[in-house]
Structures are given as structure tokens and as C-alpha cells.
């Protein structure tokens, strides 16, 4: 494995080349097509995954089969970090929403490496804290924000993580269907579509399949608050 791939991952950015080379020998690579599941909620969790290319969604399913989309993750982001601290069942289902490549490391190998590089534990805890903060914000948004505000906030978040600046605005290839975007903001597809149509009519965005061009970023930011 090319260690430049590992060096691009924030978790490993402070590890020297020799140690990264040793770590790479313990890793395996996985490729997913859109729609493939990496693992499902309830599966045994004993590996840590890192996205190197593409995007995946994290979701929960209710007893009646409805999906709650928790997050969309892309290159450099960690999946299954809870397995480092708790070898219980997976707490979510992870599904590719675009062709995706990942690298993985067994729990025992990662723990041995962290014991030799304790600063990594701090980085891992920082990532866990970020995820918890995002979850708390999502819960607050469901209580205090209306659907258009949540849609605007989701678009801005996707733009910050996956956007590409163009002369017209920020182009975001989010790879989500309308249903998945609705799940992400915790609303019905019809209500989310009305919000998107309103933003289009105002000239704030332009829809392009599973992508969106954000034209009036400032107005979206104000609508998100």
C-alpha cells in the first residue's frame, strides 16, 4: 500500500514514514460499488475502516424498516472507531453511495499501534467528540429548526466537506438521492423537495441530479440559522 494514502488521513498525519510503512503491512483494502454495504447494524465489530476515495452513508433502521440517515462520510474519515473501545455490535449500517475504496485495520493491531503512539488516542477521542457534537446539533435542529433551515444547513455542510469552488459558485457532488437527502435532514421527501424548489426559485441553488450548485452561499447560511 502506498503510504501517501495513509499520510493524507488526519489520524496518521503525525506518524513518521517508517511507522506508517509498518502499519500499512497490517492493513487490507476494500472496494464497494454504490449500494454495497460495508457492514450492517448489529454485525460484530472488530475492524476500523478509513475512507480513501468515494462516499458512504451511516444509517439506522427502525423496527418498521424506515431509515434514519446519520451522516455522509468521505475521504480521510473514520468508520467503526467505536470498535476500538467496545467490541460490541455495530451501531449503524454503512452503505456506499458512490464507488468507494477503504482501508481497514483489525482491532488488536490498531490497539497495539496506539499503545506505541499514545498521541493517536487523543486524535481518536477528538474524532469521537466531533461525532457526538454533530449528533447533538442534529437533535437540536430537529426540535428548533424548520425544514428549510435544516436543508440549508445540510447543503452548507456537504459543501464544506465535498464542495468544489467554480466561477458560478460551489459545486457539490453529494451522490444522495432525494429520499436520502430527506432522511439526512429528518423530513419527508415532499417537504424537502419544496424547500429545494424554493431555493431554486430564489436563485440560491441549482439542482443537477445527485449534485447541487450553491450560488448564494450567504443567503443559505442566514437561512440555516
Image: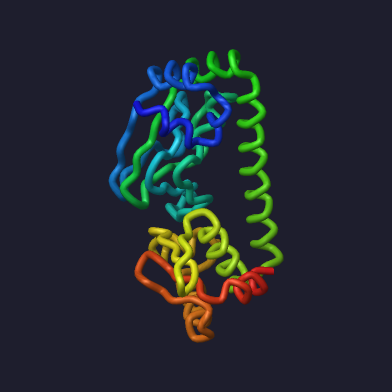
> Residue 16, position in %: x, y?
53, 22
| Viewer-closest of 55 and 217 | 217
User: Residue 87: percent from the left, percent from the top?
Assistant: 53, 23
Residue 152 in the figure: left or right of residue 62: right
Q: Is residue 149 above or below residue 55?
A: below
- In the drawing, does residue 133 fall left or right of residue 108? right
Which residue sits at x=50%, y=40%?
77
Q: Is residue 26 left or right of residue 192?
A: left
- Identify which residue is drawn at 38% across, 47% down: 54
Which residue is painted at 45% across and 47% down in the image? Answer: 74
Which residue sits furthest bottom?
201
Is 182 located above or below residue 95 in the figure?
Answer: below
Q: Position of residue 140 (x, y in %)?
A: 70, 58
Residue 45, can we see it? Answer: yes
Quarter assignment of residue 27? top left
Total marks in image: 0
Where 186 falls versus 123 (above or below)?
Answer: below
Amino acid at each position: 500500500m502506498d503510504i501517501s494514502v495513509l499520510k493524507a488521513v488526519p489520524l496518521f498525519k503525525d506518524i513518521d514514514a517508517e511507522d506508517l510503512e509498518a502499519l500499512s503491512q497490517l492493513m487490507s483494502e476494500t472496494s464497494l460499488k454504490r449500494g454495497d454495504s460495508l457492514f450492517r447494524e448489529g454485525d460484530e465489530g472488530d475492524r476500523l475502516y478509513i475512507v480513501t476515495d468515494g462516499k458512504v452513508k451511516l444509517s439506522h433502521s427502525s423496527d418498521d424498516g424506515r431509515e434514519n440517515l446519520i451522516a455522509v462520510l468521505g475521504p480521510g474519515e473514520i468508520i467503526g472507531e467505536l470498535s476500538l473501545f467496545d467490541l460490541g455490535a455495530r451501531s449503524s449500517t454503512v452503505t456506499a453511495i458512490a464507488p468507494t475504496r477503504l482501508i481497514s485495520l483489525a482491532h488488536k493491531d490498531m490497539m497495539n499501534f496506539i499503545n506505541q503512539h499514545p498521541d493517536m488516542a487523543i486524535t481518536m477521542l477528538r474524532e469521537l467528540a466531533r461525532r457526538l457534537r454533530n449528533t447533538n446539533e442534529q437533535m437540536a435542529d430537529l426540535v428548533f429548526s424548520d425544514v428549510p433551515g435544516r436543508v440549508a444547513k445540510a447543503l452548507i455542510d456537504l459543501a464544506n466537506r465535498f464542495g468544489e469552488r467554480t466561477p458560478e459558485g460551489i459545486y457539490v457532488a453529494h451522490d444522495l438521492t432525494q429520499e436520502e437527502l430527506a432522511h439526512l435532514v429528518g423530513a419527508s421527501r415532499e417537504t424537502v423537495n419544496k424547500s429545494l424548489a424554493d431555493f431554486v426559485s430564489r436563485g440560491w441553488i441549482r439542482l443537477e441530479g445527485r449534485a447541487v450548485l450553491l450560488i448564494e452561499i450567504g443567503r443559505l447560511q442566514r437561512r440555516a440559522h
